[in-house]
Amino acid sequence: MVKMHMYIVIHILVMFLILGSTQAETITLYSGRGKSLVEPIILQFEKETGIEVEVSFANTTQLASKLMTEGEKSPADVFWAQDAGALGAVSKEGLFAKLPKKMLSKVPETFRHKDRLWVATSGRARVLAYSSERVNKDKLPDSIFDLTKSKWKGKVGWAPLNASFQAFVTAMREQVGDDRTEDWLRDMKKNGTIAYPKNTPIIEALAAGEIDLGLPNHYYLFRFKKSNSEYPVSQTFFKTKDPGNLVNVAGIGLLKNSKNEKTALKLIEYLLSSKAQQYFVSEVFEYPVIDGVIPNTNLIPLDELLKIVPKFDLNEMDDIDGTVKLLRRVGIM
Amino acid sequence: MRWIINRRHSILLIGQRWYIFFPAVLICICGLIPLGYLIAKAFQLESSTLVENLLRWRNVRLFFNTIFLTIGVLITDILLATPAAWLTSRSDIKYPRIFSVLCTLPLAIPGYVIAYSLLALGGYNGIFASLFGWSIPRLNGYWGALIALSFYTTPYLFLNLRTALLGLDPSVEESARSLGYSQRRVFIHVILPQLRPAFYAGGLLICLHVLGDFGVVSLMRYETFSYALYIEYRLLFEHNYAAWLALILLTITGCLLYLESRMLNRVDLHKAGHGTSRAPSIIPLHRLKYVGYSYLCVLFIATVCIPTLTVILWLFRGFEASTLAGIFEAFLGSVSISIPVAIGCALMALPFAYINVRYTTCISNAIARIPYIVYAIPPLAFALSIIFFVKRTDVTVLVLISACMLHFLAEAIGPVRSPLYQASPHLEEVARSLGCSPIMAFLRTLLPLLFRGMLIAVALVFLATMKELPLTLLLRPPEYETLAVNVWDFTEEAMFAQAAPFAFVILIFSGIFVGLLIRKEE
């Protein structure tokens, strides 16, 4: 009897699969964002729309170079990247299609390409993290250029080989010029700044007493605070418009050669919906790119953030080559 | 003239036994062709960019960092392993066998797990702080890398030295003693020089491990060529410069192999007289015995107990049931690579072991040596050349499995070869004369004899692949999880509690397998 039931159930399932595969629209997504982050929201999208998303996960840099080698033959409909640099590189190759104006109207200009070739899905800020045990809040440096002072010799940590740091250097070059950026990097090195492989170890090192100040992305600290609210590290921004307050984004673009343009646009639209944005804010501690999301109490509101970030164009973040050359000249890479 | 005959002879043999030589040659080609791609890729770099990138202070620093680390680990290992080997072979301490097993155990703990434990011990959140209430500074950089690498490579030297010490001819020492040498002078002037081949063999293994190491130097943030290579690969679209770094690393390895073979050529230590060998004399330690015991115990505690305890304590501290699924996924990922690699290597080792034992021509010698050369290639450089070979976007699990097989083949040959030495070639001849085809003769006479050796080979390679990190890190398909990758990932993120369960599973497996191997040996 049980067996009989099983047969029927399997039969129905198979029927569903067959029907599903003939009816459901399928799109291919290249995701440079991690699986644990992306999967929940994609599953939700599939459930709500009945559209099937085939996701190919890899490192953002690798996917961008894959898209460039595949060119017009690429099976990808959508590219979701971890940072603006890769999006810039792909749009420079002319691989992205223009996104509809209406869809992007609710996103502030800072968070989208000037020719509408891609749009940000969430933002993350560079911050100044400090040991709340050893550094007085009033004595914190005002600007990222103050970190080269002898007062902070050997007390600052950074992750110069991390992609997010390099994006920041690219932006800094845009704002203050190559020469000043190079000087700053050299002075930082001379000042005994300690290199960590990633952002989290910077936070760990602050707590462990190895350093007093650090330059991570904003959301790492929240992971530590979540399990231990007494964790002896705090973070803040530099003064208004300081290059140290960069906001970088994760963003998405529609590929020109997509054969499922309409379906693919639905995914992009979904990621800009308040539901998806709420997910990024509450679960991943990122900044939203639209208004009307219930703010995370740990984050300052979006409009306030936009006031203190330096003026710069995320579209100009594609000169990774120049940054790498600079880092090589300084001897960091 | 003799050489010509020799060559013709060997070609004839190859013709007759193509079913042995063909797979062997095929495997050699698969192992070496990717290197061609690596060189091709490297020379794609424009000469102006090349000069700009290569002739920089950073490369000089990387070079000296790599060399200093290698030399440092070598010296530390000599200092750690020599007394241990002597104590367990020539002194009158009790239970020398047990102590020698304890000294071999660090082999079961991968370098990156030792690095993990050193990192997770100190600091604000560290085990030390929670046990004793005050935090010790976290080891990192040169000293961190030195200690972690020394701990896990010591057994390579220890095993070589101990075997050599047990096999020494006591009559030489006795002559020296009778000529008025003190015990200490005998050790320095008579015993140590005779241990040279053991030092070379163990030293070579250690150097190869340090040059090829990625896990420890990356976690300890000590910049060597391996680490720089990985960063280039991760961050950039273009990999030409990464190919150059791999080439430099290969050149250093090549120089090392050359140096070792030159040094070994000059050693001539065979016995002059006749007669059977005797067991070497045991030297009583008297009151110094306790120094010996405490030395061995401290070594064991530092290299095995502390890393294991750190992992276990972190495991209890941060364990969440919700992570079980992830652990299981990573476990399946590791096992589904390790099993095919282990079985594949044991099978692939057959033709090599056979050629090695049954043929002594120059071609066969060259073929038999190639797996060892592939084994000596630093894994990151090997992985990078395979990426160029298959084009990096088409990397599948199959590529990863093949790469691991080629890399670990050398580890499987030894165990398969030793029973073959004992099997008489007449066995096959008899089978042939009774009407078996050559292949059947091999399958029915030799294979049953080799079976035990192949099982040991399977166990060895399985263990090595379970712990493998650099090849997997570069060649795994996106989001393919293994235990080793998880330990490394979480440790690099300084998330020690999350890394602990994965490290723990690796330790359990390594422990079981080392235990099995030791029992087999006995």
Image (cartoon, coloured by chain):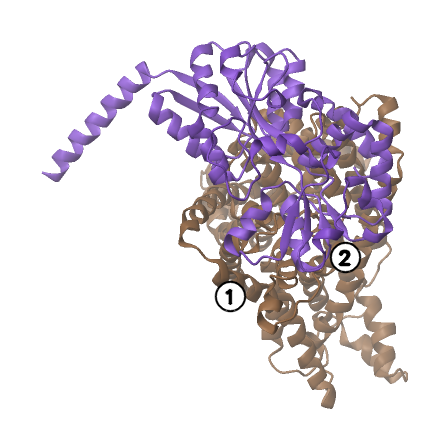
Chain colours: A purple, B brown
| Residue A171 shown left or right of residue B474 in the figure | right
Residue A187 in percent (x, y) is at 86, 42
Q: Residue at x 65, y 36 (%)?
A: B383
**CA–CA distance in space, label 2 to label 1:** 26 Å
Residue B203 got which mark?
Answer: 2
The foreground one among A158 and A130 is A130
Where's the N terminus of chain B, which quadrant? top right
- Looking at the image, which is closer to me, B436 or B499? B499
Residue B358, image x, y percentages: 63, 45
Query: Which three-letter amino acid code belongs to the residue tagged 1?
Result: Arg
Above or below: residue B192 compared with residue B293: above
- Classify mark 2: residues with Cα within 10 Å, few (<14), some (14-19) or many (20+): many
Q: Residues within 10 Å of mark 1 (few under 14, many from 20)?
A: few
Residue B63 is left or right of residue B123, and the answer is right
Give the residue drawn at x 51%, y 20%: A106
On the question of residue A4 being in view, the answer is yes
Q: Nearer the viewer, mark 2 or mark 1?
A: 2
* Residue at 61% over, 31% down: B26
Q: Chain of mark 2?
A: B
Image disc number at residue B519: 1
Disc on the earlier residue, 2 or 1:
2
Instruction: Identify the secondary structure beneath mark 1.
Output: helix
Spot occupied by residue B107 in the image (x, y as percentages of width and height):
62, 60
